[in-house]
Image (cartoon, helix red, strand yellow):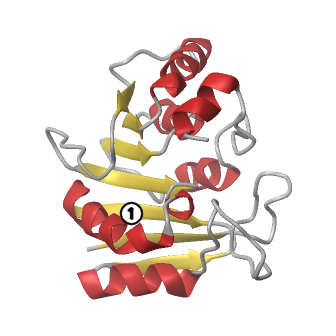
């Protein structure tokens, strides 16, 4: 089943119906103060995009599934936001060519949804899309050790996997910790990390 089919048929068990609690806490902490624009790849229904917009950060959600667009629009209307503050681009992360780089990029359930063979390309794109002195915020999930019969996505991720992708590209690790809050059933399976260049 494709991502487009999943959204069209409403088979999206990963959609928690609200912004990720670690993102809400990160925005409330002031760690991302000063950011003017944010990118949320794999944004789906847009919850995390709207969290940035409510924090006065102009936000762009990117999703490959066209059928996610009406869901995003409905949620944006319910959140009383407009497209100047929270915008959806339907497109491929690997060919997306924005007019400007982003001060913040938020990755949650995006890297883990990509085939592991694409991870180096993910790091290269993050390097290209992030503005100088910008912040890449990654909520690393699912940090688990499944058995040999496991089939993703999501594909398991661990802090060292992300370090191995980003540190050789010149990113600096600013923070790596377990979040204080998670979506139900995801507790203990996440790490939040901030990276800069």
At a point 51% along the width and 31% down the height, the residue shown is: 54
The local secondary structure at tag 1 comes to: strand
Residue 151 is situated, as x and y percent measured from the top left of the image, at 70, 67
State left or right for residue 192 relative to residue 182.
left
Q: Of residues 6 and 168, which is closer to you in this image?
A: 6
User: Residue extending furthest right?
Assistant: 185
Q: How crowded is mark 1: few (under 14 residues within 10 Å), some or many (20 or more)?
A: many
At a point 69% along the width and 75% down the height, the residue shown is: 143
Q: Is residue 51 visible?
A: no
Q: In this view, does 123 lie above or below 76?
A: below
Q: Of residues 19 and 160, which is closer to you in this image?
A: 160
Q: For the C terminus, which image quadrant?
A: bottom left
Snapshot quadrant of residue 75: top right
At a point 35% along the width and 62% down the height, the residue shown is: 135
Residue 80 is situated, as x and y percent measured from the top left of the image, at 54, 13
Q: Of residues 133 and 40, which is closer to you in this image?
A: 40
Q: For the N terminus, which image quadrant?
A: top right
The residue where tag 1 is placed is 136
């Amino acid at each position: 089943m494709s991502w487009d089919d999943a959204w069209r048929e409403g088979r999206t068990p990963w959609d928690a119906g609200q912004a990720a609690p670690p993102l809400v806490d990160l925005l409330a902490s002031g760690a991302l103060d000063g950011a003017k624009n944010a990118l949320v790849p794999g944004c789906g229904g847009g919850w995390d995009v709207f969290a940035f917009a409510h924090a006065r950060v102009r936000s762009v959600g990117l999703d490959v599934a066209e059928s996610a667009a009406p869901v995003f629009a409905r949620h944006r209307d319910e959140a009383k936001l407009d497209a100047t503050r929270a915008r959806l681009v339907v497109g491929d992360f690997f060919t997306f060519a924005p007019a400007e780089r982003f001060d913040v990029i938020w990755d949650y359930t995006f890297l883990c949804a990509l085939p592991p063979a694409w991870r180096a390309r993910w790091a290269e794109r993050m390097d290209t899309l992030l503005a100088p002195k910008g912040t890449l915020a990654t909520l690393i999930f699912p940090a688990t050790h499944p058995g040999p019969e496991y089939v993703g996505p999501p594909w398991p991720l661990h802090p060292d996997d992300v370090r191995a992708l980003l540190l050789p590209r010149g990113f600096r690790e600013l923070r790596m910790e377990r979040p204080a809050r998670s979506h139900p059933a995801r507790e203990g399976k996440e790490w939040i990390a901030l990276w800069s260049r």
